[in-house]
Image (cartoon, rainbow, N blue to C red):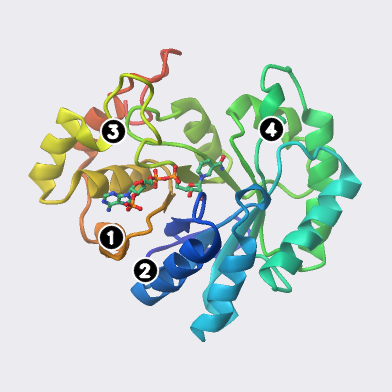
């Protein structure tokens, strides 16, 4: 599988498996199946309640721990040193692992307080704890999630260890061009969440059903979902999809087998109905 090198030389598989909502035995079965299908990169978080089953699935698979790339996340609410330090330990304990491959701040703000202007000091306090975990080899890489370029700029100069990855919402219809551009300029890998568009807004059509998406999928001889996943991986660096269906797992891994042309990436990146900010396409 294609891998992406983070700025510290750690290699991350470009296609990851999302665990959000896959809880309990349903999750355990899905993770075992995903491992059988060939997934080695799994995305969990304290708030997903999937760490215990993911750790169990990995141990039961018989595949060596070193073959996996496991990401977990510090909740957006935890903006202080001590709690960040303790939360990392708890994630390791739930997963039954002695190290994580990647630990990221789930959001620049507590989810309920997104309108507050600036959490830079809290993010830096959490970052200090994560950096210590990195130096102690409890995590192989550290990064961010849902940070806009402005959120990253507020902490960048004050971070001794620079963020290595930013996991953001990225899909056709939501390309976050300024943040992706900023990350690429600063050597921060971009990982795309909800590459299939997430739950459609009320009254809107789900992304894989869009006529343009279906038209381009037909052109490449793939399903609309494969086109969306491939777009997100090519526009960023890494894509995290989620499925509980074995057929879909195999289909999602098969996006390695085609490439969307630059011209089509440009056209697809300009379909941007969710975004009101007038951002320019990265490919323009
Ligand atoms: N950092 C963050 O704040 C954040 C936020 C949201 C998500 N995430 C991460 O990103 C992951 C992915 O995002 P997401 O959970 O919103 O899901 P997603 O991958 O965008 O979409 C999941 C949906 O697509 C369907 N699907 C997947 N592959 C398919 C295929 N090949 N054909 C047809 N349908 C397919 C799944 O149904 P089936 O099960 O039937 O296949 C499921 O209903 C999450 O699980 C989580 O790990 C991170």
Task: Give the Cα distance between marks 4 and 1.
Answer: 32 Å
Residue drawn 64% across the image and 56% down it = 72
Looking at the picture, does residue 69 appear above or below residue 170?
A: below
Which label sits in the foreground, 4 or 3? Answer: 3
Q: How far apart are marks 4 and 3 (CA)?
A: 27 Å
Circle 3/circle 2 CB separation < 8 Å = no
Give the mark, 4 or 1, whose residue is nearer the N terminus: 4
**Residue at 15% in and 29% down:** 211
Q: How crowded is mark 2: few (under 14 residues within 10 Å), some or many (20 or more)?
A: few
Q: Which of marks 4 and 1 is in front?
A: 4
Q: Mark 2 points at which residue?
A: 1
| Residues at discs 2 and 1 in contact (Cβ within 8 Å) | yes
Q: Which labelled disc corresponds to residue 207? A: 3
Q: N-terminal of the two: label 4 or label 3? A: 4
- Residue tagged 1: 256
Q: Which of marks 3 and 1 is nearer the N terminus?
A: 3
Asked if marks 2 and 4 touch (Cβ < 8 Å), the reply is no
Residue at point 15%, 51% (across, down): 222
């Amino acid at each position: 599988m294609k891998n992406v090198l983070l700025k510290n030389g750690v290699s991350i598989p470009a296609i990851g498996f999302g665990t959000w909502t896959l809880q309990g035995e349903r999750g355990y079965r899905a993770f075992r199946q995903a491992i059988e299908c060939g997934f080695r990169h799994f995305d969990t978080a304290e708030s997903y309640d999937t760490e215990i089953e993911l750790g169990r699935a990995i141990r039961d698979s018989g595949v060596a721990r070193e073959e996996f790339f496991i990401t977990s996340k510090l909740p957006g609410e935890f903006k202080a040193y001590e709690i960040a330090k303790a939360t990392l330990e708890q994630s390791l304990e739930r997963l039954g692992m002695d190290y994580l491959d990647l630990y990221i701040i789930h959001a620049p703000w507590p989810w309920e307080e997104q309108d507050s202007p600036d959490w830079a000091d809290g993010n830096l306090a959490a970052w200090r704890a994560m950096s210590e975990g990195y130096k102690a080899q409890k995590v192989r890489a550290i990064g961010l999630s849902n940070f806009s370029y402005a959120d990253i700029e507020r902490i960048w100069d004050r971070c001794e260890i620079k963020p290595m990855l930013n996991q953001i919402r990225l899909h056709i219809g939501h390309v976050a061009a300024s943040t992706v551009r900023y990350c690429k300029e600063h050597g921060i890998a971009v990982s795309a969440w909800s590459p299939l568009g997430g739950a459609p807004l009320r009254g809107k059509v789900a992304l894989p059903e869009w006529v343009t998406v279906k038209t381009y999928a037909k052109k490449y001889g793939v399903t609309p979902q494969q086109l969306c996943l491939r777009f997100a991986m090519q526009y960023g660096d890494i894509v995290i999809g989620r499925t509980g269906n074995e057929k879909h797992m195999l289909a999602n891994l098969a996006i390695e087998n085609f490439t969307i042309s630059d011209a089509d990436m440009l056209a697809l990146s300009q379909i941007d109905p969710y975004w009101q900010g007038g951002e320019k396409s990265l490919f323009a």
